[in-house]
Amino acid sequence: MSDSKTNCLCGAVKILVEHVDPKFSVCHCQSCRTWGGAPFFAVKCGTNVKIEGHDKVKMFESSSWASRGFCSECGTHLFYKFKETGEYNMPVGLFPNLPGLQMDMQYFSDMRPSYYCFSNETKEMTTDEIMAYFAAQM
C-alpha cells in the first residue's frame, strides 16, 4: 500500500506513513488492555513515518523494548514504537480505509481473558515466546 495519511482525533498530530502492512496483529497483554481498555489491534508501519505536531506527542516507556505515543491534547493512541529498530505499530483504527485488512497474529495469547475470543485462525505467541523473541532482539 502507498502513503497513508492520518491524524489524531483533535487533529493536533498528523502522521504520514510510507507503507502500512494490512496484515495486523492483536496484542492481549495486560499493558495493551489497560492502555486502551481492550486488546491492541495494530498495523506494522515500519520506520518511514513522518509526524507533524511532535510537541503534542507524549511518550511513555511501557517496556524495556518499546514506548507508546499518544496525543497530549485528545489522548488518541498514536503508536507503539520499538526502541531497537525504530519501527512503529499503529492502531488499525487510525487508518479507516485500509484495503485487505487481515488479522495475522495474536500476541500474549495466554493472557487473553476468557470474556472474549476471536474466530480468526492466526498465529499465536504466548508470554514465554514473546519474551524469548524480544530478548533475542536486544
Image: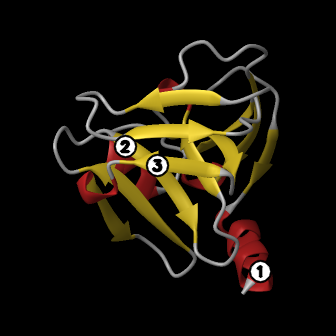
Q: Distance from label 3 to label 1 (Cα)?
A: 26 Å
Q: Where 101 falls versus 48 (above or below)?
A: above
Circle 3 packing at 10 Å, graded few (<14), some (14-19), many (20+), is few
Q: Three-letter amino acid code at disc 1?
A: Gln
Going from N to C along the chain, the mark reached first, 1 or 2, is 2
Question: Which one is nearer the viewer's eye here, 18 or 137?
Answer: 18
Going from N to C along the chain, the mark reached first, 3 or 1, is 3
Residue at image position (34%, 65%) is 59
Side (left or right) of 94 relative to 100:
left
Can see residue 97? yes
Q: Distance from label 1 to label 2 (Cα)?
A: 25 Å
Image spot of residue 3 (x, y percent): 69, 30
Circle 2 packing at 10 Å, graded few (<14), some (14-19), many (20+), is many
Q: Three-letter amino acid code at disc 3?
A: Ile
Q: Distance from label 2 to label 3 (Cα)?
A: 14 Å
In this rendering, the label closer to the viewer, 3 or 1? 3
Residue at image position (68%, 75%) is 131
What residue sits right under mark 1 in the picture? 137
Image spot of residue 19 (x, y percent): 74, 38
What residue sits right under mark 3 in the picture? 51
Say what secondary structure mark 1 lies in: helix
What residue sits right under mark 2 in the picture? 77
Say what secondary structure mark 2 lies in: strand
Q: Do the residues labelled 1 and 2 touch (CB within 8 Å)?
A: no
Circle 1 packing at 10 Å, graded few (<14), some (14-19), many (20+), is few
Q: Three-letter amino acid code at disc 2?
A: His
